Amino acid sequence: MTEEQMNDSNTQSMKFRYAGFWMRFWAYLVDLIIVFSINGILLVPFKFINDGFTMDIGFWTVTGILSSIVFYLYFLLMTKFYNQTLGKMIFGLRVIREDSQSLRWNDLIFREIIGRFIHRVFFIGVFLYLFVAFGAQKQGIHDMIGNTRVVFEE
């Protein structure tokens, strides 16, 4: 048996306890509080620029663009370097790859940026979180896109 076959059989024999909808929901709420707090601190100086009026770039405001960047970077970087966000840490959850290898940048870009963008931009996207509640491996669309799972820490 080759080393690759042994790794495949070990990966298949590993059993994970997948995190369900409500645990992930509460962790996400904690993360939102953290991101909103960071944005509040970072974006206060913009209240003193331009006499308190918003600075627009097309349809968007500068503070809206910056707060979105903070939002996506928080989830991307925390998940890449810690396999979990602060909300997931509090609830004992972590993100793993489908094949149990270490998370790669392309997995996380698809999961944290593209997947979350779909959930936030399209109205129907919010309802796609219900996949977590009813799927066998408790995957949301963003997990399916990124080939990831959210599991309880062991």
Image (spheres, helix red, strand yellow):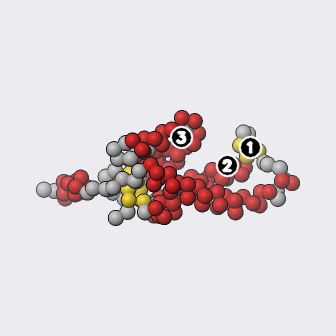
* Left or right of residue 126, residue 52 in this image: right
Which amino acid, mark 2? Ile
The answer to the question of whether label 2 and label 1 lie on touching residues, with beta carbons closer than 8 A, is: yes
Camera-nearest residue between 74 and 91: 91
Mark found first going from the N terminus, 2 or 1: 1
Q: In terms of image quadrants, where is residue 17?
A: bottom left
Q: Residues within 10 Å of mark 1 (few under 14, many from 20)?
A: few
SS at mark 1 in the image: strand
Residue named by callout 2: 65
Camera-nearest residue between 81 and 26: 26
Mark found first going from the N terminus, 2 or 3: 2
Q: In the orientation shown, which residue stands out farthest toward the front?
A: 22
Q: Quadrant of the N terminus?
A: bottom left
Residue 126's tag is: 3
Q: In terms of image quadrants, where is residue 104?
A: bottom left
Give the residue at x 37% y 63%.
153
Q: CA distance from mark 2 to mark 3?
A: 21 Å
Residue named by callout 1: 57
State the image coordinates of residue 150 (x, y, percent, origin top left). Answer: 40, 53
